[in-house]
Amino acid sequence: MNHVHDDELDLLVSRADLDGLIRLIDASCDTREWARLRAIGQAARDAVRTGRQLWPAATLADYRTALLAPAEWAAQVVTDEVGQFSLGPLTEVVAQHHTWDELVPHLPPGPARSFVAHERVLRGDLIDDPSIEPVLDLPLRLEAWEPAYPLAVYKPNDAVFDPPTLPSLPIEAPLPPPGEVIGDPDTVEAFRALVEPWTAHSNGRIEVAVVEGDHLEAIAALGPARARITTLTAPEAIAWLAWAGSVGGAHGRRRGAATGRFGAWWTVAALAGVLDEWPLPPDDLGDLARSMQWFWWDAFEPSQGWQLQLAVCDPTEGLAWAVSAQDLS
């Protein structure tokens, strides 16, 4: 970074010139001046502590560094602090274009390093590193029964968090009377925790029904007069659970694909009633997921915003669950 750029940066910060700082960030990325980009982020962050509202510049500089800079620079912005205003967690952003082998020499020990490892596993890396802290109690490999998880696509100025492909719905399925509603606080809490950013930090809502009976009786317990239903495989259902657990809804903060994967596994364990045995051997959890019957349903509403509408049936136990979570964009 040369002296001219130092002077320019100092002047922009002293004036609290947010537009000028963003232009400087763009220019630094275009010319691949990563030291300058890091200096912009640090200067803007320091200015926030003195009352100048330059946090968008600090956030953008860190985000671009994680996404675009070489691994030795990108790893510097990955910390255990939450990047509250970033498009997504930097542990996920940095994993998009950098392999674990590239990043690991530059990542200090700590939870953030572990989250980066789990994000890279979802992108195909095989990681065997006993020094990684077990922050998620998940294997550092993808199991044969798992889906191809829906992953974020980060771009310099925006990001795409597409859900799994929505199943085509068949014709209307007649609904019987609702099944007898029973208490199942562990599973209800697991579903609620999955979409907590939708309800706590956005405009979302969630309803969960647990009944003695089948999936149709569980859906009926949520109150729709009619429904459309289609079957899902266990991997398809897990992909939907993981997507719901990774995104923030319309206005909440994204939590990342690694957190979504954990939420999906935890929810399956709650449905199977084995949370007290957590963490389960992965093959056992896969067997439990496949032993259940999974369905996507709707009540003929148009698809819009963020939604999770699953029904699950455990024919062995005679229990069923239905969840309807939505957050309009």
Image (tube, rainbow, N blue to C red):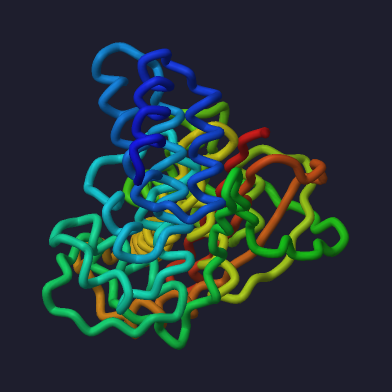
Quarter of image, res 296: bottom right
Q: Is residue 12 left or right of residue 147?
A: left
**Quarter where residue 268 is shown:** bottom left
Q: Residue at x 53, y 28 (%)?
A: 202
**Viewer-side residue, 120 vs 30:** 30
Query: What residue is shown at x 39% (from left), y 48% (from top)?
Result: 89
Q: Does residue 213 appear in this view?
A: no
Seen as rendered, the residue at the extreme bottom is: 144
Above or below 321: residue 15: above
39 or 55: nearer the viewer: 39
Position of the C terminus by quadrant: top right
Looking at the picture, how far across and down is residue 107, in whole percent? Answer: 21, 63
Q: Residue at x 47, y 65 (%)?
A: 96
- In the figure, 12 relative to 291: above or below? above
- Give the residue displayed 42% in from the left and 41% down from the top: 61
Report the front residue among 5 and 284.
5
